[in-house]
Image (cartoon, rainbow, N blue to C red):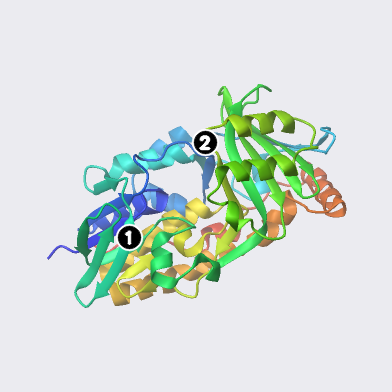
Amino acid sequence: MTRTALISGAGITGQAAAFWLRRHGFDVTVVEKARAPRSGGYPIDIRGTALEVVRRMGLLPRLRDAHVDLRRMTFLHEDGSEVATLAPHAVTGGTAGADLEVRRGDLTGILHAAVRDDVEFRFDESIDTLDQHHGGVDVGFRSGREGSFDVVIGADGMHSRTRELLFGPEERFHRYLGYCFAVFPMANELGLSHETVLWNAPGRSAALYAVADDPEVHAFLNFSVPQPPSQLFRAPGAQRELVAGVFADAGWQVPAMLGALHAADDVFFDAVAQIRMPRWSHGRVTLAGDAAHAPSFLTGQGTSLALVGAYMLARSLARAGHDEGFAAYERDTRGFVTANQDLVGTGGATLFPTTAQALEQRNDRLRRLRTAPAARAVPAHSALTLPGHPA
């Protein structure tokens, strides 16, 4: 008898899980609150064990074609003068020539093309209620539809509705890391190409990220704040006013960035945080990707954890029922997740110092990197040896 799976979220985690579950004969339905597959978004990294996942999916050649090939990172003082220009891998700890960096929209598009003919997608839809029983999970949807599934997977991001229904409010698992950020597009008025330029003042940073010779760049504003402004997460206008106030006296290109912020239709604002949970599953429902273990962009490992976790989850379910399968998924994946979440200890302090002294210490480290030997790969990126899938 065919097993059925419902996945909430058609992002990277959800579509990767759909791919592998379908490979193992599951009848898969994916619901997504957006009205269409999401495009755009800033570039993301695929490293270490995750490279083997996309190779086994048959997607590695297409992703190599989509690689954005970032060539340099330039760090600036508060007055706009240069601190250092470095190869990206010297800063990120990646492996030159092996790691991939692609636009988020390119990755989700490639994943969607790989699964759309074999999986039922319901856009403009989301889970409203979950009722578990011995035979399955009865699901009520926002549209009023109902359905029953053998297992349900919450792949609906850091602010997961599935997690809230299953385990309670996000605050129980939200580990705030002291920063908020906004990302949005703006005109490439500096003619940047395959590079990032990062301006810093204590507790504030502004970056322009050019993935190619495009007429637009990704603008990034990051700032420290003691407590997350939770009341603003559903108030876009107030978010923009907060960011504008924090950067009101900043120089360099920041005034132009603030103008673009107010004009942009596509602004992503959030707190820099992690999700840390004692367990990811309950009964026939489990969480995956950022819903279970968001590592924050400070680690650079969110996408890689999503791809590896989706693979491990599907493998475990293919080998056993939900009880044993979910237990194996957590047991075999958690160490890899924790090792990569712990990388946050090197990310924020390195790139976004909050005091003048810490900023100068960081700048000294960056200057030394210009003459340092090539950086070694970060062990956490490949800390899990990918097992085979059962036939």
Q: Quadrant of residue 214?
A: top right
Whether label 2 touches label 1, CB < 8 Å: no
Q: Residue furthest left?
A: 1
Image quadrant occupied by the N terminus = bottom left
Q: Which residue is mark 2?
A: 266
Marks 2/1: CA–CA distance: 26 Å
Instruction: Judge the density around disc 1: few (<14), some (14-19), many (≥20) Cα neighbours within 10 Å.
Output: some
Q: Is residue 10 left or right of residue 320?
A: right
- Secondary structure state at the residue bearing disc 2: loop
Q: Is residue 16 left or right of residue 186?
A: left
Give the number of the mark in front: 2 or 1.
1
In the image, residue 186 sits, relative to residue 30, either above or below, namely: above
Q: Which residue is mark 1?
A: 128
Residue 352 location in percent, x, y? 73, 50
Q: Quadrant of residue 280?
A: bottom left
In depth, the one of 146 and 91 nearer the eye is 146
Q: Amino acid at mark 1?
A: Asp
Residue 218 location in percent, x, y? 59, 34
Q: Quadrant of residue 321?
A: bottom left
Instruction: Judge the density around disc 2: few (<14), some (14-19), many (≥20) Cα neighbours within 10 Å.
Output: few
The label on residue 321 is none
Q: Residue at x 84, y 32 (%)?
A: 81
Is residue 321 in view?
no
Q: Amino acid at mark 2?
A: Asp
Is residue 235 in view?
yes
